[in-house]
Image (cartoon, helix red, strand yellow):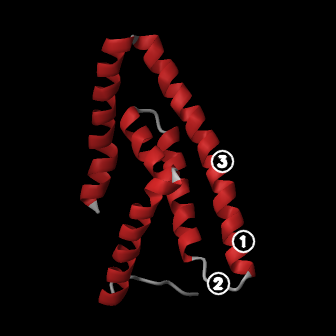
């Protein structure tokens, strides 16, 4: 857990700052700021449209009595992708875009399913009940 938090709070911001500085040197400071704002706006729009699509699919699967496995994973990907796109920086924007676009979500969902299945089979998944 410490490694993940270290990555999130130390390494990612340093990488983002380095990329922002390098892009700023090439295209200029104001253009870099404008580009970051543009990608954040695009990310918010994409998250909204993809979120609606996933929500409709989730409702359809539930109304048909099917378990919403893929729709739930899509929802998690869209949520994380939207958060990453709203975070200032270019590296997080690329990761967020990958999570938001349906064709690139397919391999990510496959990896997530394997990870969840492995955790369930080992018994390392903790479920809290009331």
Q: Residues within 10 Å of mark 1 (few under 14, many from 20)?
A: few
Please state, as top left, top right, bottom left or bottom right, where the C terminus lies in the image: bottom right
- The residue at the point 57 percent across, 62 percent down is 75
Q: Position of residue 7 (x, y in %)?
A: 28, 49
* Count of numbered badges drawn on the protein: 3
Which residue, given by chain and number where applicable, does mark 1 sit on?
59
The residue closer to the viewer here, 113 or 128, is 113
Which quadrant of the view contains residue 55?
A: bottom right
Residue 74 tag number: none
Q: Residues within 10 Å of mark 2 (few under 14, many from 20)?
A: few
Q: Nearer the viewer, mark 3 or mark 2?
A: 2
Please state, as top left, top right, bottom left or bottom right, where the N terminus lies in the image: bottom left
Residue 66 tag number: 2
Q: CA distance from mark 3 to mark 2?
A: 25 Å
Q: CA distance from mark 3 to mark 1?
A: 16 Å
Q: Secondary structure at mark 1?
A: helix
Lateral position of residue 102 relative to residue 53, left or right: left
| Vertical position of residue 116 compared to residue 48: above or below | below
Which residue, given by chain and number where applicable, does mark 3 sit on?
48
> Do tag 3 and tag 1 residues touch (Cβ < 8 Å)?
no
Q: Secondary structure at mark 3?
A: helix
- The residue at the point 56 percent across, 40 percent down is 43
Q: Position of residue 11 (x, y in %)?
A: 26, 42
- First along the sequence among labels 3 and 2: 3
Q: Secondary structure at mark 2?
A: loop
| Vertical position of residue 88 compared to residue 125: above or below | above
Q: In the displayed image of the protein, which residue is found farthest to the front?
A: 103
Q: CA distance from mark 2 to mark 1?
A: 10 Å
């Amino acid at each position: 857990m410490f490694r993940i938090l270290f990555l999130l709070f130390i390494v990612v911001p340093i990488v983002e700052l380095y990329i922002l500085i390098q892009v700023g040197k090439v295209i200029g400071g104001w253009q870099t700021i404008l580009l970051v704002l543009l990608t954040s706006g695009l990310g918010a729009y994409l998250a909204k449209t993809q979120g609606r699509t996933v929500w409709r699919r989730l409702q359809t699967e539930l109304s048909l009595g099917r378990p919403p496995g893929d729709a739930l994973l899509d929802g998690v990907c869209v949520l994380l992708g939207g958060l990453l796109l709203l975070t200032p920086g270019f590296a997080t924007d690329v990761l967020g875009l990958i999570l938001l676009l349906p064709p690139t979500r397919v391999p990510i969902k496959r990896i997530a399913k394997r990870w969840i299945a492995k955790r369930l089979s080992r018994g390392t998944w903790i479920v809290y009940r009331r």
